Image (spheres, coloured by chain):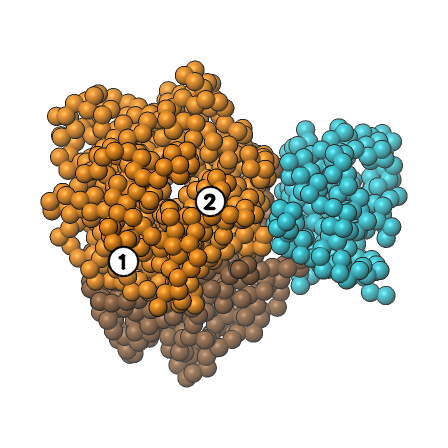
Chain colours: A brown, B orange, C cyan
């Protein structure tokens, strides 16, 4: 996304101009930026927090773009709006009892509910100075506070919220672009991961070879155009009987 | 009201590794067999094709091929005085589901166990004495299996040739072979296929470990090094090192699975019928409670059926095997307070961990070029291969560099001291991703009277049945063991030229939120004494002789290695007894 | 779509990296000389190799007969490996083995880098039989359960656009060339990958070969060329 459109959108943010999130269809560097779309899940206020937060979790630097450039906020929005956000593959029956660290997540919330609750509490707490308007240093300090404390956010301990946000951010940075993040395969190009096409029989024993084939998405066609489809559910769809 | 179906000779609960293997043997012996698989049917073409299968988010992170926790989970606690809570999302272990089970998305790591593993208690007592064992832990309940390696060897051979395992033998009929593992148990003949090409990290480990006087060997692999036709006439192809092995299915017909090594023949057998999307609720017993009459199951439309059968094979993965016996009232459930009872007893896991070795940034590891069973390892610290008498623990771990890929959502190592997120984290990830080697430690899980499985009193599955409850922590013995090996691993990391070597080693308490292994074992263990085992040495239930429980649930404790090939061997061993003795004269094969 | 100039530079850069780091030639370390490669393509080598352009055209687009493969924008590493295979007999061809034997390692590196960087339009070709193309698409994307063949694109890349450096594109390649070379794989005249491509080719029957040939010939890929418009 271009600098100009992002700045103007942040200004408009609180007023409900909900076009923060990055484009629907991603393509290679040099392609014209695609039209931003309205978030499916986040409200404008929530989107403003998420956009600014992920930009601190994985910031841009002089060499590589970060979470914002990679469309991580778009990815998170699509995940929370879809089956995963609604609680697919989550054992949801009660009773819900706080457990030990070894027992893992025990809250009744689906990811979507968890984000709604936590973001509601955060935006209420920060109403006077919204997160997006803080300096980078203050944003980092606030994120660290969420990460290291168990401040109650509408029933969600802040460290649990932070962990969810961080995991989604890493996924959004490194998952296949078909899911709406890792735009232009920025995350893959940064580390040198070649992507979903992976036949290395001839190369595996060329020890130490410098391998810089551009990465390939599972959703790209013969013209390197990535067809994003975020609604792939996390189970194997089989046409067999 | 359940619909009663026409009787068949045998039914398998689950159609994964043991379910496919057992069904084929029995159907070929002339019996009618129904395979009931709770998940869906799926095949290499079209379901396992890439690029869709090369989707880390969907399959590795969201566990797309695994059991759906919405329907069925497991509850967990470390200790009996805690309340077990549901594992609401899989992490530490990943139960499979669907046709082929976890034998579809395993890594293909294909070891045999060692001779001493089968008579573990006798071996330890003989070498170190009772006082030594008590000092390792009075709660340890290691047992002998009731079967020897020598008895299993022909079945190991048969299973390895079914899969087309690739490797270099280290011991052929007692003669140590160059290039192989000098510690391995003697095998009758060479592996069916040569070892896989050596990856770079494998070569670096081999040189480092070799320089310290250890004995590196190529990991035995069921991802194939060349095309192969197995004894059933099924053809496998050559692995292309795509780096999407465990948690993924293979698009190239190059990973041994039921789909590539058994099912095409099984499904053509007129005696066999596969029914998918059928959840078995319980095994039905007659009024004597000593004979199974068949099973009750529910299909995916919610209709209940009763399938009468003369022989019931529980082939549902260790955790589900134990649960099925408990739900069906077969065998006396284990009571940890009294130590009485057997079903659920001696639940074990795998003790894993390992070091991270950060190499010079000019060394391109390219770990994304890998297979499921790559690399090289050493057995110098496995099992009882080293003298434990001054060490105060039993057991050991193999050590090797076996990175099975480098998918970036889950693999992005950073050195200690790197912040958990932000600018410095990002720089460290970019800097180290392609220049880091992982060394794995993988080893024994010693049985303890404190670790067991039973039925949860509170939480239920989608069919209204109690979930399995798991009570487990690593015995102190296993912690001491892994810490000892961790020190050796650091030395190897340095010998490999690591600039920074981050020590591994397992810690307590066992934490279900971190992936470790899906080698759950025990709970329906085999043995020679019905008071301390659920099944006899032919995996036949002592209490209900027409029920056999096949799989790693039979292991009295877990040994150093990945256990898939041992499960195959043990299954062939049990099936030989079923075909040659049981079917001719149904009844107990061993007098209690 | 990526502007052509940028694409050309990208491909050339890839060819440079590819050729420099992966070629089995003895001259690893010498960057390939595209200009010199162009001269060889146009005029042949001093040692007597004829001009590549005589069969493959100066822009690598060959001609519509399909007797000579399209080599425009093909991976440099792959092109070089084929020339080496022709020279050593790993790949049999009465014509090409003579050509390759009169090329030095530097000649091979330069010509491969040149053709990897040059554009040629996709020629307008007769459309194939639609049922055959459909079968070809299935084999390309999903494979065949009965014949145990994984989809071609697993290895040959998205839409068959190639998985550089070692696996060539099929998209836009002449169908008759694909067919003839699959027969060569079947019969063992191409020996570089007997357990991969050799095995797969032997699993295909003549209908399958006709199908994938008809399909790939018409897959439009901007990576290998723009569709010529007249």
> What's the residue at 20%, 60% (across, down)?
B457
Q: How many angstroms separate mark 1 from mark 2 (CA)? A: 33 Å
Q: Chain of mark 1?
A: B
Q: Residue B119: horizontal and vertical position, in percent?
A: 27, 27
Q: Residue B490: horizontal and vertical position, in percent?
A: 32, 32
Establish if B341 lies above or below A117.
above
User: Which residue occupies the foreground of this view, B211 or B86?
Assistant: B86
Quadrant for residue C51, please give it: top right
Quadrant for residue B72, please give it: bottom left
Specify the label residue B310 is tagged with.
none
User: Label 1: which residue?
Assistant: B467
User: Label 2: which residue?
Assistant: B31
User: Which residue occupies the foreground of this view, C5 or B60?
Assistant: B60
User: Which mark's residue is nearer the viewer, 1 or 2?
Assistant: 2
Establish if B234 lies above or below A31.
above
Question: Are labels 1 and 2 assigned to the same chain?
Answer: yes
Of the image marks 1 and 2, the number of the one nearer the N terminus? 2
> What's the residue at 30%, 25% (across, down)?
B116
> What's the residue at 23%, 55% (across, down)?
B455
Q: Residue B512: horizontal and vertical position, in percent?
A: 28, 51
Q: Chain of mark 2?
A: B
Question: Can residue A129 be seen at all in this image of the molecule?
Answer: no
């Amino acid at each position: 996304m271009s600098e100009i459109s992002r700045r103007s959108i942040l200004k408009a943010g609180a007023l409900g101009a909900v076009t923060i999130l990055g484009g629907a269809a991603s393509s290679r560097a040099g392609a014209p930026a695609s039209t931003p779309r309205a978030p499916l899940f986040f409200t404008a206020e929530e989107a403003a927090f998420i956009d600014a937060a992920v930009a601190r979790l994985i910031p841009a630097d002089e060499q590589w773009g970060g979470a914002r450039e990679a469309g991580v906020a778009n990815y998170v929005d699509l995940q929370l709006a879809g089956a995963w956000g609604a609680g697919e593959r989550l054992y949801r029956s009660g009773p819900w009892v706080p457990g030990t660290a070894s027992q893992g997540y025990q809250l009744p919330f689906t990811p979507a509910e968890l984000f709604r609750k936590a973001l509601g509490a955060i935006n209420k707490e920060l109403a006077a100075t919204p997160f997006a308007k803080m300096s980078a240093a203050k944003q980092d300090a606030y994120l660290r506070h969420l990460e290291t404390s168990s401040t109650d956010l509408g029933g969600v301990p802040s460290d649990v919220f932070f962990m969810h946000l961080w995991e989604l951010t890493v996924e959004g940075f490194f998952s296949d672009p078909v899911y709406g993040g890792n735009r232009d395969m920025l995350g893959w190009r940064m580390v040198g991961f070649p992507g979903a096409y992976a036949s290395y029989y001839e190369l595996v024993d060329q020890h130490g070879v410098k391998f810089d084939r551009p990465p390939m998405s599972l959703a790209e066609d013969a013209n390197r155009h990535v067809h994003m489809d975020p609604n792939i559910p996390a189970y194997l769809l089989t046409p067999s009987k | 009201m359940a619909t009663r179906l026409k009787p068949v000779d045998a039914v398998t609960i689950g159609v994964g590794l043991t379910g496919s293997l057992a069904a084929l043997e029995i159907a070929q012996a002339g019996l009618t067999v129904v395979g009931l698989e709770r998940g869906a049917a799926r095949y290499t073409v079209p379901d396992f094709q890439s690029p869709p299968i090369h989707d880390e988010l969907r399959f590795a992170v969201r566990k797309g091929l695994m059991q759906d926790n919405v329907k069925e989970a497991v509850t967990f606690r470390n200790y009996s005085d805690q309340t077990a809570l549901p594992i609401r999302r899989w992490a530490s272990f990943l139960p499979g589901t669907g046709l082929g089970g976890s034998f579809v998305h395993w890594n293909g790591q294909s070891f045999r166990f060692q001779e001493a593993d089968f008579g573990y208690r006798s071996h330890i007592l003989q070498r170190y004495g009772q006082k030594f064992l008590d000092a390792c832990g009075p709660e340890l309940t290691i047992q002998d299996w009731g079967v020897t390696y020598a008895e299993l060897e022909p079945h190991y051979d048969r299973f390895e040739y079914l899969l087309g395992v690739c490797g270099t033998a280290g011991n052929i009929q007692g003669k140590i072979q160059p290039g192989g593992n000098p510690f391995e148990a003697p095998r009758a003949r060479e592996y069916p296929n040569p070892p896989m090409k050596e990856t770079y990290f494998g070569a670096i480990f081999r040189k480092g470990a070799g320089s310290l006087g250890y004995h590196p060997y190529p990991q035995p692999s069921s991802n194939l090094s060349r095309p192969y036709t197995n004894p059933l006439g099924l053809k496998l192809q050559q692995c292309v090192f795509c780096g999407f092995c465990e948690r993924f299915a293979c698009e190239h017909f190059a990973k041994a699975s039921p789909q590539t090594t058994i099912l095409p023949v099984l499904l053509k057998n007129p005696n066999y019928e596969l029914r998918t999307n059928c959840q078995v609720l319980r095994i039905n017993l007659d009024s004597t409670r000593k004979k199974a009459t068949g099973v009750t199951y529910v299909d995916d439309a919610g209709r209940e059926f009763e399938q009468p059968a003369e022989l019931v094979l529980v082939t549902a993965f260790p955790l589900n095997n134990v649960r099925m016996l408990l739900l069906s009232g077969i065998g006396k459930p284990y009571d940890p307070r009294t130590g009485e009872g057997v079903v659920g007893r001696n639940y074990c896991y795998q003790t894993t961990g390992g070091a991270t070795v950060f190499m010079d940034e000019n060394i391109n590891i390219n770990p994304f070029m890998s297979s499921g069973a790559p690399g090289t390892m050493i057995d110098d610290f496995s099992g009882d291969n080293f003298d434990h008498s001054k060490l105060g623990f039993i057991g050991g771990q193999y050590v090797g560099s076996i990175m099975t890929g480098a998918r970036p959502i889950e693999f992005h190592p950073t050195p200690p001291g790197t912040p958990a997120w932000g600018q410095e984290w990002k720089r460290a990830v970019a800097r180290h991703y392609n220049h880091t080697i992982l060394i794995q430690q993988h080893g024994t899980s010693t049985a303890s009277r404190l670790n067991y499985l039973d039925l949860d009193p509170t939480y239920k599955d989608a069919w209204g049945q109690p979930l399995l409850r798991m009570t487990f922590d690593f015995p102190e013995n296993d912690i001491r063991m892994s810490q000892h090996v961790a020190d050796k691993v650091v030395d190897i990391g340095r010998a490999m030229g690591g600039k920074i070597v981050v020590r591994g080693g397992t810690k307590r308490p066992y934490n279900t939120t971190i992936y470790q292994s899906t080698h759950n074992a025990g709970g329906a263990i085999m043995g020679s004494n019905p008071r301390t085992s659920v099944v006899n040495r032919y995996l036949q239930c002592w209490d209900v002789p027409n029920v056999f429980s096949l799989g790693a649930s039979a292991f009295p404790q877990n040994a150093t290695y990945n256990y898939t090939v041992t499960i195959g061997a043990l299954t062939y061993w049990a099936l030989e007894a079923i075909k040659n003795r049981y079917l001719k004269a149904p009844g107990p094969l061993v007098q209690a | 779509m990526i502007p052509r100039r940028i694409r050309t530079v990208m491909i050339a850069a890839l060819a440079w990296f590819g050729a420099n780091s992966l070629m089995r030639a003895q001259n690893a370390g010498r960057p390939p000389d595209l200009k010199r490669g162009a001269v060889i393509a146009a005029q042949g080598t001093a040692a007597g190799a004829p001009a590549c352009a005589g069969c493959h055209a100066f822009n690598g687009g060959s001609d519509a007969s399909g007797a000579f493969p399209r080599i425009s924008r093909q991976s440099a590493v792959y092109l070089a490996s084929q020339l080496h295979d022709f020279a050593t007999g790993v790949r049999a061809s009465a014509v090409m083995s003579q050509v390759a034997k009169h090329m030095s390692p530097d000649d091979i590196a330069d010509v491969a880098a040149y053709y990897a960087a040059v554009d040629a339009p996709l020629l307008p070709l007769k459309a194939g039989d639609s049922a055959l193309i459909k079968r070809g698409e299935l084999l390309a994307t999903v494979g065949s359960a009965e014949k145990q063949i994984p989809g071609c694109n697993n290895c040959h890349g998205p839409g068959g656009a190639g998985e550089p450096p070692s696996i060539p594109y099929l998209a836009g390649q002449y169908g008759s060339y694909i067919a003839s070379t699959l027969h060569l794989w079947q019969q063992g005249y191409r020996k570089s990958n007997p357990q991969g491509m050799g095995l797969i080719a032997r699993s295909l029957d003549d209908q399958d070969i006709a199908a994938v040939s008809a399909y790939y010939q018409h897959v439009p890929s901007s990576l290998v060329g723009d569709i010529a418009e007249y």
